[in-house]
Amino acid sequence: MSAPTPSGIPTPGKVVASGAVVLAMTVACVAGLDGLIQPGAWRWTVGVILAIVTAVIVAARLALRRWAGPDVSTAASLTPSLAGLAAGLWLLAARFGGSAPRATSGDLDPVVTLENFRGLARLARTVEEIAVTTIAPIQPLEAIVALFAAGACLVLVLMDMFVAVRVPALAGLATSLLWLPSLMIVGDVATWSVVAVTALLLVLLAVDRPSVATARTGRATAREAAIPVAGAGLTVTAVVAAGLAVSLVLPSLPWRGAVSAPDLRTGVANLTDDLDLRRSLQEQSTREVLTYTVSEGAPPVGPLRTTSLLDFDGRQWLPSDPDTEPARPGDLLWPSLAEGSSATSFALRMQFEGLASSTVPVPLEPRMITSDREISYDASRDAVDVADRLSSGDSLEMTVMPRNLDPDRLRAGSPLEPSQGFPNRFADPELMVPETSHAPEIARLAYSVVGDVDNQYDAAVALQDYLRTSPEFNYSLSVPAPTSDDAVWDFLQDGTGYCVQFASAMTIMARTLGIPARMSIGYLPGTVGADGVAVVRGRDAHAWPEIYFDDVGWVRFEPTPALQSGALPTYAATATETPTPTATETPTPTSTSQRPTSSTTSGTSTTATATAATSSSSGANGALVASLLVVLVVAAGLTVMLVRRRAVHVHVRDVEDAWSTIVRAARTGGIEIDPAATLRATAAHVVPGGEAVGEVARRVEVARYAPAAPAADREELDGLVRAALDEVQARVSALAAAENRTNPADAGGAPGSTVGDADRGGPRA
């Protein structure tokens, strides 16, 4: 009989129960990531895949136990986990590797070929592109669901490996791997998920306790019994450390929220081009997106646009199909040759830092771009794309030709025809108004705001000033719950929002007046340093409306309060505000017209919040780091003390209990005990020449046959038992080593073996 190893397979009931608990832990982890991926049918997809993988693992482990018995090597005990890993890979290829998307359809390709794995690889390559063009919570696109399913399978298999080697407490560390992306990106995990996983971990420890049968057998088995306790202690320490570390490091991670979007969803990556007015915006990143310099004497650069949007469905702006054409170096990238462009141009050199996109942010004026990359241009969106995605260190040069945007010129060339009436329904996309229940009310409000003006320019300025300066409107990152089918009407009623709401309201109100308008997204000009380099950060992400003027083109207006958008452009400034400063003074988001209301205070601007956090965090971080170190030291010390105490702790009531402990240890180690043998014969058989074992046997004889003998000192007896258990462990190890050298497959010894029945068996009467 071979000595059992900690990696032995438990009973079939425990195998099934452990598999079920591991599955439940993984599902609880995945279900708690609502802040990272939007809820939906993808949960069912991932859950089914995890259930099948678990079934494969449990079936393989039961088959292994039936074929090889419960006592298997560590390597053999891991084979069911590897079988589950292979099953997971097959399922991923079957579900996501085909030609048609099946992320939420429930379809499964029954035949997996090499082409499925190639499709899976192609899908994996799209994940990074989605990550830099989408913001959390991410839509459950096929590639994203495949990524989550793959990560969940890997974590489940890793947890099963810990269970297979009989250290289930470490499964808690594996579950934290699924939470790390959510902690790093959105800084949060569902509380119920953490509670559920913790409770399930305790259940797992109760189900799979490899040392229960041997907890009292001696020093070696006591160490085994301490493994779950040590694992639990280390798990708690790791979770506490991770939580504190994330809270300290997360705001300064260079890639976290590299480019936040002017959307009402969490800004975590690149600018998105589908803006949902129903969602609230979280604080945006302070990481550099790009830097630029301009030639001496250049006018203000103004915002940098990435794209424009025309289609609005009453709730969100939707991107249109791209219509790009190749552009050659020196081509004027502008929808049309606008009359009145300034004869004076200036050079702009742009270097990219954290912008992982193929779309180039460009000034709002006609421009020519010089680059060693292939360039394409979409005139309908006034968007410039390069062949490969931009990365840190890339640069390009532009020649910018500002237009003449004199207010008198804009006013004279844009008559507003009263006959256009309301509500307006036009075929041109820049004039389309969604048919909602409140479209007429929006039109009536727009006409009441502009009054009897007779041109588009004055109407646009009136709408801009109404939204920008009226006390009814407050800048806030939090958006109230919807009350109607029209997000613009809801904003006009509650007056709370940020750039997307302000810009959307002006765009739709202008369209109801028959004024061509569109939504643009990009970045504010950033901040110019003492060296003349302008730095654009993720927090500078912005949205604004643009109005079309004949013979001029699209012109930006700024209805968002100065708290976020800075000063107005010169051509759109009114008597109540100072226009955009000189070229070397890029607007800074400071408020002169916004009133300090409670709503504004609660929804502090992204720039102000980020700046305050940066300037005041250094001193606080030092104290937090010191606290973190103290917590780690104390937790690690308590864990070590607990492990040591469990490892050496042996308590016996009397000499009979001491002898029973030694006998149990011997039997557990594979040494057969003859109950008919005398105490001294049994001691000599268990450990030939063992002083401690022999002494315990002698004391038992005295206690049995000399009732008047004094009781043994408890501490002394405990020490004697520990020494005896050391002797038993050494004997068991020696027997196992000799048996493995001669014939590992024969537990009872083989011909010529030095360890045979006489050594393993007990003494004969």
Image: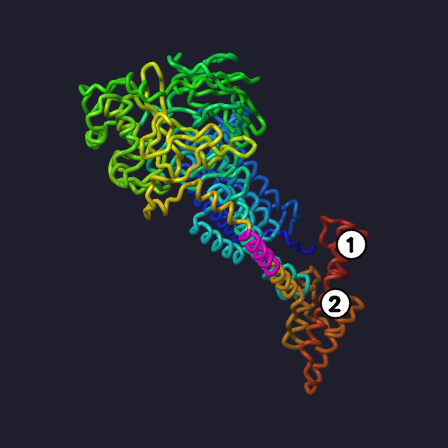
In screen coordinates, is 633 left or right of 677? left
Q: Residue at x 22, y 21 (%)?
A: 454
Q: Amino acid at mark 1?
A: Ala
For residue 764, the mark is 2
On the question of residue 437 being in view, the answer is: no
172 is higher (above) or lower (below) than 342: below
> Dot 1 lies on which element?
helix
On the question of residue 498 being in view, the answer is: yes
Q: CA distance from mark 1 to mark 2?
A: 23 Å
The location of residue 383, given as percent across then percent down, is 43, 21
- N-term-proximal mark, 1 vs 2: 1
For residue 738, the mark is 1
The location of residue 384, given as percent across then percent down, is 46, 20
Q: Quadrant of residue 476?
A: top left
> 692 or 31: nearer the eye?
31
Q: Which stretch appears magenta? A: 619-635
Which image quarter holds the N terminus? bottom right
> 371 or 219: nearer the eye?
371
For residue 646, the mark is none
Which image quarter holds the C terminus? bottom right
In screen coordinates, is 64 left or right of 282? right
Residue 103 falls within the magenta-colored stretch:
no
Q: Amino acid at mark 2?
A: Arg
Main secondary structure type of the part rendered in magenta: helix
> 765 or 474: nearer the eye?
474
In screen coordinates, is 162 left or right of 49? right
